[in-house]
Structure formats: C-alpha cells, structure tokens
Image (tube, rainbow, N blue to C red):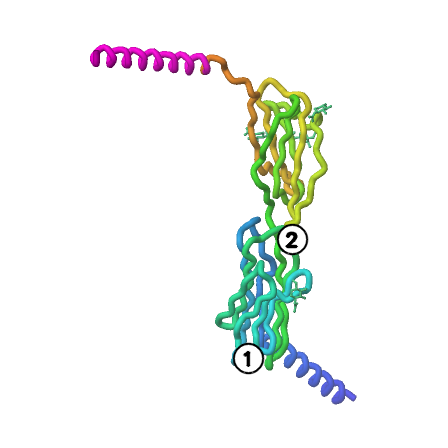
Amino acid sequence: MKMEILQECGVLLCVLVFAFARSENEIIKLRSPDSVSSQCHTHTTMSCKITSQDEPSISMFAWIGPGGATLCKLDERGGVVFNDSAVSCTYRDKQLDLTIRHTKPIHEGRYICKLRSNLGGKHSYTQLKLRECHNQLHYHILDGNVTCGARGVYPEAHIHWFQGPQNLTHSSVSHPSIPAEDGTFEVASTLPHQHQSALNCSLWSPSTGRLLSSIQMSPPASPPQSRDTFSRATSFGAVGTTVTLFAVALILL
Ligand SMILES: *[C@@H]1O[C@H](CO)[C@@H](O)[C@H](O)[C@H]1NC(C)=O
Ligand SMILES: *[C@@H]1O[C@H](CO)[C@@H](O)[C@H](O)[C@H]1NC(C)=O
Ligand SMILES: *[C@@H]1O[C@H](CO)[C@@H](O)[C@H](O)[C@H]1NC(C)=O
Ligand SMILES: *[C@@H]1O[C@H](CO)[C@@H](O)[C@H](O)[C@H]1NC(C)=O
C-alpha cells in the first residue's frame, strides 16, 4: 500500500518536472509587444520575432488586423505578400515587422501575429492604442457670434471658453460633433454675442482632463491711427514724385 502511493507520487513528480522543463525550454517561441501606443498621423511598427534553437520550416507567418483580415504574410519562398495598401511589412532574421504608414483611430485594436511551422504553431497579441489627436483650432465671427472648432479630433474633445480668468463655457452652445471616415471628429462651439475683450477658445481631453490646445482671439477693432499714418506717407510720396518730375521737366527745357 505504502509502496503504491510512493510509486504514484514518483510518477506524478516525474510528469510535473517534465512539464516544467518543457515550458521553460520551448522548442519555438513568438514574441511581440503587448501594447503599442502611437501618435496620430505618424507611422507605427509592430515587430513579431521567432526564437528557436533549430531553424524552423515556416508554413505560415502573418500579421492579422483587428477586423480579422490578414494584413501581410510570408509566402512559400520567404517573400512578403501584402493585402492592404495602408500597411507594409518586412521580414528579416525570423522577424516580421508590420508598419502602418499613417496611423488613424480606425487602426486601433488587437493585432495577432500568427505562426505555423514544423516546430509548432504559436500566436501572440499586440494592442494598438492611439494618443489624442487634433488639428489646429480655428474660429470665425458671424453676426456677432464667435464659432471655434477643430477637425481631426480624437477622442471627442470638448471646447471651453475663457475671458481672462472667467469661464464662459456655460453660455456657449456646442455643435453635435461630426464623425469623419478615419475615425476622428470635427468639433465646434459657438459663443453668442461677441465680447469686447480677448476670448480664449480651448480644447480639452475628455479622458485625461488635460488642455490640448488653445487660441486667443482679439476683437476685430483696427486702430484708425495706423490708416492715417499710411495715407499721409502715401501723399507725401506722391508730392515728392510730382516735385521730381517738375524739376526734370525744368532741366529738359
Ligand atoms: C484581404 O483584405 C480584404 C480587404 O481588406 C479582406 O476582405 C480579406 O479578407 C483579406 N484577405 C485575407 C486572406 O485575409
Ligand atoms: C469651465 O466650465 C465648464 C462647463 O461649465 C467645465 O466643464 C470646466 O471644467 C470649466 N473649466 C475650468 C478650468 O474651470
Ligand atoms: C447668433 O446667436 C443668436 C443667439 O444665440 C442666434 O439667435 C443667431 O441665430 C446666431 N447667429 C448665427 C449666424 O449663428
Ligand atoms: C487659454 O486658457 C487656458 C485655461 O485658462 C490657458 O491654460 C491657456 O494658456 C490659454 N491660452 C491662451 C492662448 O491664452
């Protein structure tokens, strides 16, 4: 009885040690970053690397996009085949690099690097996250109302208004944001009735509460003094020219 238990324990220990050794010393491994954080409109590269003691014979090595489509893969001859004009891939030293040329919000999600080989099959996941993006704030004044907005905003940011230290956001009307094809938004806000002193229009991140961008707009009052100076200078120039012409005429006569 005791002997049997001992034997069983021995077998179990053997199995455990073997399983441990196997997981520690896998024949083939696949490695890609857990997550990649990218700036809007820049290029993003995700690398997937095979590590193995022996040279594997690869039957499939590919990057698959968040939608499930194969973005690029190795063909039988070891060349790279693309299936998406927005990306490019390179293969070197058992490493497949996926590059998204112009990263947009629609590219966010989970990417899968997949391998099939004579040494086994593996896959690894990489999460692509995009940092906040926005184009420049711009504004226009119509019928005394000031409208301020920005395109290419992601995620949907808020516009706030200030006049000096005073927060005027509560009296503004924000427009419904307009989604663009690339996953960004156009946001805008109108402050009714124009204010006499300088206004500050600012864009705020909804996730971090951080100020992303701001512009200062001054009331469109052009000082009349400058126009006076300009016309005086012009008439002086005109008088000068007349005098010169008169002198030339006298000499010629
Ligand atoms: C190639 O791309 C198209 C469109 O992006 C997709 O529908 C198709 O499934 C892709 N092919 C493969 C093999 O994934
Ligand atoms: C300004 O007002 C808006 C809305 O009333 C508010 O969400 C925002 O936090 C305020 N900002 C500051 C800096 O007080
Ligand atoms: C300006 O604001 C007023 C008051 O909110 C509104 O009635 C008017 O339609 C606005 N004008 C324009 C051109 O947006
Ligand atoms: C606009 O107001 C915000 C909040 O008070 C401030 O941080 C920012 O510097 C101002 N921008 C300009 C251009 O004055």
Secondary structure mostly taken by the magenta-highlighted segment of the chain: helix
Instruction: Please identify the quarter of the rendering in which residue 233 is found.
Output: top left
Above/below status of 51 relative to 86 = below
Residue identified by numbered label 2: 106
Amino acid at the residue labelled 2:
Ile
At 75% from the left and 85% from the top, the residue drawn is 5
Instruction: Please identify the quarter of the rendering in which residue 206 is found.
Output: top right
**249 to the left or right of 109:** left
For the C terminus, the quadrant is: top left
At 65% from the left and 60% from the top, the residue drawn is 110
Above/below status of 107 relative to 4 = above
- Work out whether residue 21 can be spotted: no
Q: Which residue extends farthest front?
A: 253
At 51% from the left and 67% from the top, the residue drawn is 90
Secondary structure of the residue carrying tag 1 is loop
Residue 192 lies, in percent from the top left, at 68, 24
Q: Is mark 2 within 8 Å of ligand 1?
A: no
Which of marks 1 and 2 precedes in the sequence? 1
The nearer-to-camera label among 2 and 1 is 2
**64, 142: nearer the viewer:** 142
Q: Residue 56, which numbered label?
A: 1
Amino acid at the residue labelled 1:
Pro
The region drawn magenta spans: 227-253
